Image (cartoon, helix red, strand yellow):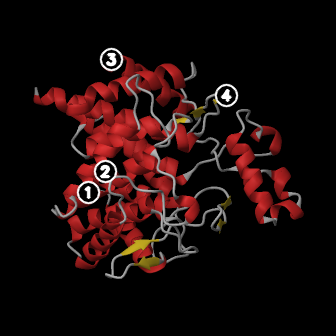
Amino acid sequence: MTRDIQSAFTSLTEYCEKESFKGYDPYDGLNSTFFQSIPYLSGNRVARLIWIQFFKRSPVNFRPIAGIKKELNPKALGLFLSGYCNLFRKMPDVKHLEKINFLSDKLLELQNREWSGACWGYNFDWQARAFFMPKNSPTIVATTFIGCALLDAYEITGNEKLFKTARSACDFILKDINRTYDEKGNFAFSYSPVDKTVVYNASLLGSRLLARIYSITNEYELYEASEKSVRFCCNNQKEDGSWSYGKLHYHQWIDNFHTGYNLECIADFNKYTGNIFFKENLERGFGYYIRTFFTQSGLSKYYNNSLYPVDIHAPAQLIITLIKLDKFREYQPLAEKVLRWTINKMQSDKGYFYYQINKYFSSRIPYIRWAQAWMFISLSAYLAQIKKQNGKN
């Protein structure tokens, strides 16, 4: 089985490097030069929502004819960077080090310098139901994935600039991100500086970066904010161990990979702070996650209450979640069954992975962030974990 995964990973790597890590995104519809040329549409909130959803949901890629180009996505670069760090730890190689340095430099170049600390957004305008985010507007999600990737690279290269930039990202989280408090003084971080939505995985991702920096600098302010955010999110966990996506009435769905985000972030908080307050939350959450979202045949469900769509992000997140929670060895047969199904059903002959399989149709568009970057970090983590286990045998 490892040989099959290695072959799939090699094909994926060749594709991504050939594309120079550029590609399309499910949400990049507003990059359309055609759409931008019509002010009535581009200035209308409803029109922006419809346009984005059309490109996201269409199984046919109309982006080339709509004037949407393949571009670098900062979050994708962060995921690729962490993936190459996984590979370097598995087997130090000068080619991997070259990619680590290239991606690190590119992320430093792409950072948004208009806020209190280093931060990153996406390479496209984005209209959500709750708010509008102009291109390159920073989010806590993109910033924390990139901050952690820079720390991964710092551990390998010793480049102090990478650590200082990751530390600077904590200032963005503490000073620019809004907070929603509960009656006990705990709080959730907002998704961005321009909204006040409560999205549990976003807040926990911010907590994870603060905790990781705290483990290096011992700054109590970072620990305190991180702990209060984790406590807020754990207090909003349901009795069965699940979390809804967020607090708003239209954020009440429960899905696979955001649950995985929540679990890995809480596990990382415990790891970096030495805290065990949330062990029971992890156990309940993992029990729900592993029982609910994966079938015996190896198919990964998107939602808790429906089989479709099968989204590439879900199997990718499984590997990361198992490793973070130290559950990989116990659930390795399931992990390999899921990877086998995903490789057989969702990888093209060109090496890239498809976006989604639906009941009646599939989207085989090669999204660089959503599909390729996530499968890259997932497969690299799997291969590194197998190497680590074999080294102990």
Give the amino acid type for the residue marked by disc 3 in the picture: Met
x, y (%) of residue 117?
45, 74
Q: CA distance from mark 1 to mark 4?
A: 37 Å
Q: Name the residue at 63% across, 29% down.
A: 364
Residue identified by numbered label 2 = 285
Q: CA distance from mark 2 to mark 3?
A: 29 Å
Q: Report the front residue among 121 and 200.
A: 200
Q: CA distance from mark 1 to mark 3?
A: 33 Å
Q: Is residue 192 above or below residue 387?
A: below
Give the amino acid type for the residue marked by disc 4 in the picture: Phe
Of labels 1 and 3, earlier in sequence is: 3
x, y (%) of residue 131?
64, 68
Q: Give me the disc on residue 361.
A: 4
**Disc 3 residue crowd, few under 14, some 14–19, many 20+, Cα 10 Å:** few
- In this rendering, would 9 be left or right of 128? left
Of labels 2 and 3, earlier in sequence is: 3
Q: Are marks 2 and 4 in contact (CB under 8 Å)?
A: no
Q: CA distance from mark 3 to mark 4?
A: 29 Å
Q: Give me the disc on residue 1.
A: 3
Of labels 2 and 4, earlier in sequence is: 2
